[in-house]
Structures are given as C-alpha cells and as structure tokens.
Image: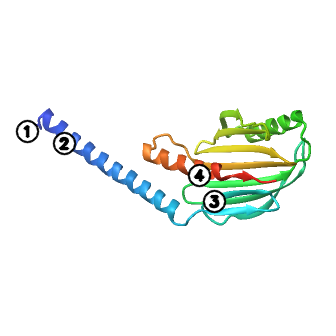
Amino acid sequence: MKQPSPWATSATRLRKLGCAAIVFCCLLNTSLLIAQKVGRVKAWQELVSTEGRFRVLLPDTPEDRFVPVPGQIVSTEMHAYFVRSAVASYVVAYADFPKKDPRTLKQAFDNARTLALADGRVRLISEKDLTTVNMPGREFVIDDGVNVIKDRLYYSNGRLYQVIFIAPQPNGMSDEFVKFYDGLESKFFDSFKIGS
C-alpha cells in the first residue's frame, strides 16, 4: 500500500482547517447578525419613573418588582426594573437612603462591593469613583465566570440608585461583537437621567 506524501497530508489538513475556519466565521457572523437583529427587533423605549425620579432607555418593557434589602446601613425595599433580552440584561433600581453623610455613602458603596463578592463566586475586575459635584457615585465591574456585570451606584436627593448592565464575557469575541455590546452598554448608561 502506497503511503500518502507528507505534502498531501499537510494539504488535506490545511483544507480541513480552512473549511473549519470558514464554518466558524460563518457561525460567528450569523450569531452577530442574530444578536444585531434581536437588539433591533423593537425600538428602545423610555421608562419614566415619576416616583423614582429617573428616566432611562430600555430595549423592552421591564418587569417591575420590589426587592427586600436587609443591610447594616439601610434595611428597606428596593424598587427594581428588569429587562432580560436574548443578548443582555438591564436593571435599574432605587431605594430611599436619606442620609447624605459622605462616610455613610462611602460605607454603603463599600457594603455593595462586599455583598457582591461575599460568596466567592464572582471576581471584581475594577472599581472606580463616579462622584460629580452634585452626585456621589461608584462603578463596579464584576466577572461571574460567564458574564461581565457593570454595576453603577448613584446617590441623589435621598435616593440610592443602582444601574446594572449584564453581557457575555468579551473573551474570544470578534471586534464586531465587542462593538455591538459596547453600543448597548453606552446607550443604556448614557440614557439614565435622575430628575429632581
């Protein structure tokens, strides 16, 4: 029996790899098109909460619920709005928090981080101060092994607000996917406005 030449074997392997790469690229591009279509199925709508004193754009009608929040600093109910789409999740929540003492606010922000990391299943990627002249704030970026969770906390006029964007980890994503998710994140966070 005649042995195939090493060149023929290499050429066959290259063709198979090339076919696999083409299939992978087609699947990736198809996934991107599906993600973009899902993201565009409905026009984003503005949620205006007169009780919460904020407005934000969301890709769908949110679920609305009250969530009990026990804590060292505050023990109350948080009013939360959730949207889970096929490509990302969005949360906006608020609770009364009457004390404006900077040490108490810093402690509340620190407690939020500690609570998020308490069970050890998530990892803090970054944390930064978002404080402006009129509004204290902080941002946490957390990795849960599957998703990246960007969580922003703000304090304004006796209210503590939490704005969360959850998307798949960008590891291995094409540049188009990364841009797509960056666009969703920016549209969501940039649209969040607190009124008086």
| Badge 3: residue crowd in 10 Å (few <14, some 14–19, many ≥20) | many
**Which residue lies under the disc numbered 4?**
187
Residue 133: % across, % down? 78, 36
Q: Marks 4/2: CA distance?
A: 47 Å
Q: Marks 4/3: CA distance?
A: 9 Å
Q: Nearer the viewer, mark 3 or mark 1?
A: 3
What secondary structure is found at the residue carrying circle 3?
strand
User: Which residue is drawn at the image coordinates 72% and 54% (left, top)?
Assistant: 92
Q: Amino acid at mark 4?
A: Lys
**Which residue lies under the disc numbered 3?**
58
Q: Marks 2/3: CA distance?
A: 50 Å
| Badge 4: residue crowd in 10 Å (few <14, some 14–19, many ≥20) | some
What secondary structure is found at the residue carrying circle 2?
helix
Q: Marks 1/4: CA distance?
A: 63 Å
**Which residue lies under the disc numbered 1?**
2
Q: Amino acid at mark 3?
A: Leu
| Badge 2: residue crowd in 10 Å (few <14, some 14–19, many ≥20) | few
| Badge 1: residue crowd in 10 Å (few <14, some 14–19, many ≥20) | few
